Amino acid sequence: MISRTRSIAGATLALLIATTLPALAGAAVFGKKKADQDTMPGRKLTPAQNALIDKAIVREKEVIKVVKERAPLVETYIQNMKPDPVLLQIPESDQHFLARVDFNKVINDDEYAENKGNFQAKKSHFAFFKNSLGALTGISSSLRLTFHESGFVQMILMDSNSFDRQHYTFTFIRNDFLGNIPTAVFDVSPIGGKRSFGRFYGRIWVETHVGNVVRFNGDFAGTITTMKEFYHFDSWRTNVQPDLWLPTSFYVEESDPKSASSTLKFKAINYIWGYVLKVPSNNAEQTSEEVVNATDVSNDAPDVSPLGAQRAWVQQAEDNVVERLFQAGLLDAPSDFDKTLEALANNILVYNNIQMPRPIRVRTLLTEPLESLAVGNTIIVSKGLIDTASVETTDGKQIEGNLNAILAFQVAHIVLGHRLDTKYAFSDRLLFPSTSIFERIPMHHTAADNAEAAKKAMELLNAKELVDGQQYFGLYLEQLQQRLKALPALNQPMIGDALIKSDTDSSFWMQALVPKGIKLDLKDLKQQAAMPLASFLRFDPWTDQLVQMHPSFEPILNERDKMPFEVEPVYLKLSYYKAPTAPTAPPAGAPAASTTPDGTGPATAAAPTDTTTPATAATDQTAQQTQPAAPPQ
């Protein structure tokens, strides 16, 4: 088991970059400005352009209002880079931070702006739900760095106090499309120029339908004489509800001014999701809900055997944990992609002639670290692990082989009976606020269980239908082995099992697959061992529902194009919100779809805004025996 301990200094550094970069910035988006150049020159706006800017100012106030009412999850992952003679640059070290942020406490808050708080991170690796004020403003005074209110918040809101004509000038640049969205592009500069410390300085994309800002990039005006580097960011939003665009992600990078080869000093990605998580009221945890959508079938229920009672007890613990993780925003809402993974997992059982009392379910952990977990009959796989292992090829065999290997490890845990502690069948074990830390749920398996599961997984993967796919995950692990030393945070699990054995043993639990893999050759442009982060899945930040991306083909021209396990810039295919379609009535006698967070009832989440979804694989056990699931396309 990997140590769940992380130093305060390390966590502070991770958060520091996310919260202080713009405040430390001392130049405009195009570099240093001359001393007498305070504003950007430009032609006079037309009446239509002026009207659009007025709409954008009004809409931005509405966005700020909505964000203040929410307490979403905020994840930041940073990779510090170093020069490489072959690949130009590669990661040298990394940092990861995850928190739930109550923006009502940090927007327009005096204590937040004055930075009176201190970082009080607990040493436990599970302490990722912290006090919002401390999470965003607590910077160790020993680091001697300055914080300003135009830090983290302005990276998602530009200016949370004064985005208006009294403080900014606007210059029209061009009309542009972002995905399906027509936009007008404007350059923005503070009226006071670089004397306006902390004001946004850059470019905005305004959709022309209602006037929402859907993208903006740049930096912040002002100078700090001790700083020589300038930090820039690119922030994107998603249309989550009618006429409402909320922050989704932003990318930050810093160039190395001393590098002759234009090497970056670092690059970072930030994600915001879970907007359905409202700011909790004082008595929110004490309220009860009326039972709905439940049918009384007590007269038809059979008696339960002792073994059936034991399995029902384990399932109750499983359902409690899965539901709580979903309520906390860590698990995705059930999706078509999860159904595809479920079909692949159940096919592993079919190919090995193993019959389970109930089908395996699969959910996705919406975070970057590479990990997986089995909670009862539910397998949980992190989005980062799926993204980096999803190497798409024309025949689909590589992604199928990788996913089968990932799932087989946790299927083995289920088959071997390595279950979650059944104390969680008692509901009171999980009655704590969603903003609390998750120290109370040690969900990782023991080292002994993982070793036994790895051996069993190899047996499962030796089925004739699966054996040819072993080479691909062996190649993936070879590539990861080369990056392990530089990416400890990416390989430090949040709640589950890592791919590696421990901090002191960097071998893999599935090490037996490495010699079965294709020989790693970075110069082979036809070989892609692992993908960059965020390359396969995206999620709706309002509903937390995943969708599979279908990007256009980009040929690999040299070794630098591969970028395994690396952070890359954000570029979203934007589209307008579409209301979820009403579900069609099932045929007479057909069972109802199971799409609730625990897989036992009707769905309540809205459909994802991306109209592209993967093919849905059947999850019926009988259907799987006659028609195994196809790999994601």
Image (cartoon, rainbow, N blue to C red):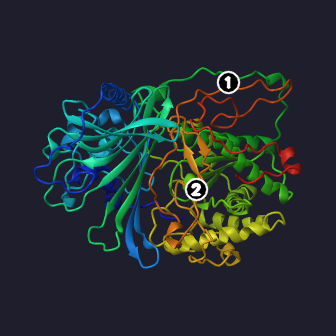
Measured as percent of width and height from the top left, residue 621 is found at 83, 45
Residue 72 at least partly seen: yes
The residue pinned by badge 1 equals 582
Do we see residue 459 in this rendering? Answer: no
Q: Residue at x 57, y 77 (%)?
A: 523
Quadrant housing the N terminus: bottom right
Q: Which residue is mark 2?
A: 387
Q: Secondary structure at mark 1?
A: loop
The residue under label 2 is which amino acid type?
Answer: Asp
In this rendered view, identify the residue nearer to me: 155 or 2. Answer: 155
Q: Which secondary structure lies at badge 2?
A: helix
Mark closer to the chain start, 1 or 2:
2
Number of other residues with Cα within 10 Å of mark 2, as a class: few under 14, some 14 to 19, many 20 or more: many
Q: Position of residue 391 (x, y in %)?
A: 63, 61
* Along the viewing direction, whichever of 185 and 595 lies nearer the viewer: 185
Task: Determine whether label 1 and label 2 are within 8 Å by CB.
Answer: no
Residue 524 sits in which quadrant? bottom right
